[in-house]
Amino acid sequence: MIDPVVNKIQSHPKYLELRKKRNLFGWGLTLLMMVVYYGYIALIAFNKPFLAQPIGAGVTSLGIPIGMGIIVFTILITAIYVRRANSEFDALTTAILKDVSK
């Protein structure tokens, strides 16, 4: 048995818009993260000499800052998602709940 409120929400045009926007954005960021992460893994697998190049006269290789860059990139895209979720997606959710509760 499905609650009539759930049916109203699922058939609401703004809910369908919210689902579409959120899914496209989420899958886009997921794809971007996978390309960056697996690109780094492929670089490790197929071009170790490139990543093993030392930076300056120290012992740190080029792979370390690139790996740290991936961590920073992950934090950045998470912040981008949270910002959009807290503004656009939450506004749509509030509008849906307001319309359905009438």
Image (cartoon, rainbow, N blue to C red):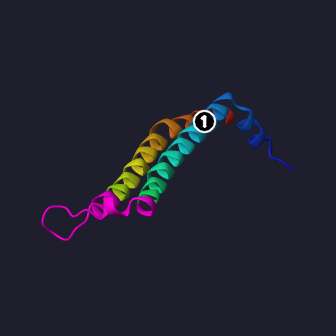
For residue 60: magenta? yes
Q: Position of residue 88 (x, y in %)?
A: 49, 35
Q: Secondary structure at mark 1?
A: helix
Q: In the image, what residue type sits under mark 1?
A: Leu
Decide which of 6, 76 is in the foreground and name it.
76
Which residue in the structure is indicated by mark 1? Answer: 18
In which quarter of the view is residue 43 placed? bottom left
Q: Position of residue 24 (x, y in %)?
A: 58, 38
Q: Residue at x 49, y 56 (%)?
A: 38
Instruction: Report whether residue 97 is seen.
Output: no
Please identify the quadrant where the C terminus is shown.
top right
In which quarter of the view is residue 53 placed? bottom left
Image height of 33 relative to 14, above or below: below
Image height of 83 relative to 38, above or below: above
Q: Residue at x 57, y 35 (%)?
A: 21
State which region is magenta: 44-67
Decide which of 74, 95 is in the foreground and name it.
74
